[in-house]
Amino acid sequence: MKRKTGITMAMLVVIVTVIAILTTVTVTSISNSYNNSKLSVWVTEIGIIQDIMKERKEDVTNVLMDTISFDVSGIDSNIRIEQFAGETIISNKISLREINLAAIGVDNAIYGIHKNNLDIYAYSETTGKVYYLKGLDSRINTFYTLTEDLKNRYGDNLTVTNLSLITFEQSEVSPTENAVKVTVKVPKTYTNISITTSNASIAIGSQVSETTKYKYVVNTNSIKANYKITVTYIENGTEKTATHEVKNVKATLGALITSAEDYGKTVNYVSDNGVTKWRVFYEDTTNGYVYLIATEKLAASKLPSLSNTTVTTSAVTLSDGTSKNVAQLKWSSVPSSATVASDAKIKWKAEWTSYTSANNTKCISYFLDENYWKPLRNTKSSYSSYVLGAIGTPTAELFVLSWNAKKAATGNTTIYNKQITLTPRSTTTGYYVKDASVSTDTYLQALTTLDNLYIWSTSEYSSTWLASPGGVSANHILLAGSSGNLSYDLYSADNRGIRPVVCLNANVPAVQGFTTDFVLVD
């Protein structure tokens, strides 16, 4: 097994050092302008990442991810001149590469962990500089990278002598099928040292005394598993903890999903037509399926050509201020029914008996015809064989299974305010949607809107169709409404979009992620 040294140790120092700064360390003020603890934390973090990338400059390929066309048009011209000097700027954009913090061993960074709002670190292959794309606002400026001024003012004062020096050195940092050992080094000035792991089977080696530190090797019995290490100790009379997680041992996606509380976690699945944001929706442990749902409503460009439909586009402003252009699909006339696979009842939990007679079921059959939704599969990677199918939007049956399971797993009756049941009204119309605790049949249920796995957004134009008929009449389809209702509308109604679903074999290889919760691996 190849042992990673030097860089791994240096990088993993940031896990404890940043936390130490935030919680216990008082950084000496350099001047009134720089008396900013948030800035000092960021300077430490990006400084270490910059040093690591500098050491790896001859071999950065394996730690870089997507290319990002970073728009600098809104950045003050003086900042552009100072901080982006040397970069090639074309049409106000710079080509950068996202840094995979996991690959360089930084798994507890304070910044650079929310890609959806540019809270990421990126690398310039032109200049070798590391940038923080969201920008760090301070009293004096907005910083995207380490300036000479910052390095001069902070460099001599944020030395490791001021910081916690527990280090965690993994034997391997890339996705692996091997057992990963971790060498933990704790300064001898710390007392009452205790090391535990989240996996009781993992053995911890005896303490070894070095010059200034005690060394412990975790996982001496070579257990092939992901696990968490917790170090408790006393420093200057105060009890403290430091943690580290091994997340790169290949498991399966099904094994990593430990309960319905994991529903909603992100997965790095990418469809052939470029849908990149997906979340765990449901796990069928009986049949070995894991369902992913698109994080967002589809844009019009991602929709297949469906006969008898009209597609428009609406701009939706979400709660975080971002704007999304989403497709709104309605049926302008009733189509002939599409092909619903014979295993739809098992695979998609499509319990409705017929998709050939009523107007609403003819429309819904297009959502369930997998031939239309093939672009949502992934056929380009080595895990393509694990992709079992895709449909346009979840059935109400699948929606209810997911909701009820998450309600039961969390025990949170505020967010998951009721258990839902579906009751057929008749063989020709569709479902009643009811609270399981109420005997009266109803056509809709008000759900809370605190989990956007189910109610995508409360913004206007955010409702999504479900692939099941509504029982009001043979012309109604069920939907998850922006008002928070599991409700219904006519198939010809405006402003309803879709969030497609993909079915994966639960045995698809995966690891626990860093910026993404679960990572599918080749």
Image (cartoon, helix red, strand yellow):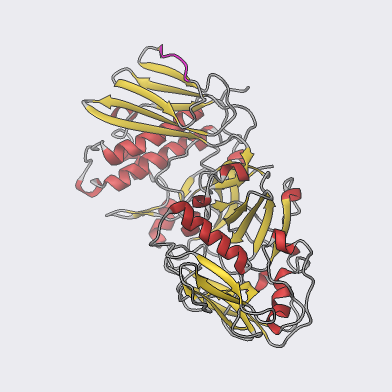
Residue at 25% in and 38% down: 27
Specify whether residue 163 is in view.
Answer: no
Residue 509 placement: quadrant:
top right
Closer to the camera in the image, 386 or 99? 386
Residue 488 placement: quadrant:
bottom right
Quarter of the image with the N terminus is top right
Residue at 73% in and 59% down: 389
Residue at 41% in and 39% down: 47
Q: Is residue 358 above or below residue 251?
A: below
Specify whether residue 310 is in view.
Answer: yes
Image coordinates of residue 263 in percent, x first then y, are 53, 54
Q: Is residue 195 above or below residue 501?
A: above
171 lies left or right of 385 = left
Closer to the camera in the image, 480 or 437? 437
162 lies left or right of 221 = left
Closer to the camera in the image, 302 or 482? 482
> In this picture, which residue range is highlighted in magenta?
204-208
Quarter of the image with the C terminus is top right
Image coordinates of residue 205 in percent, x first then y, are 47, 16
343 lies left or right of 214 = right
169 lies left or right of 390 = left
Image coordinates of residue 374 in percent, x first then y, are 75, 63
Residue 210 part of the magenta segment: no
Magenta span: predominant SS is: loop
Q: Is residue 59 above or below residue 221?
A: below
Image coordinates of residue 516 in percent, x first then y, are 54, 49
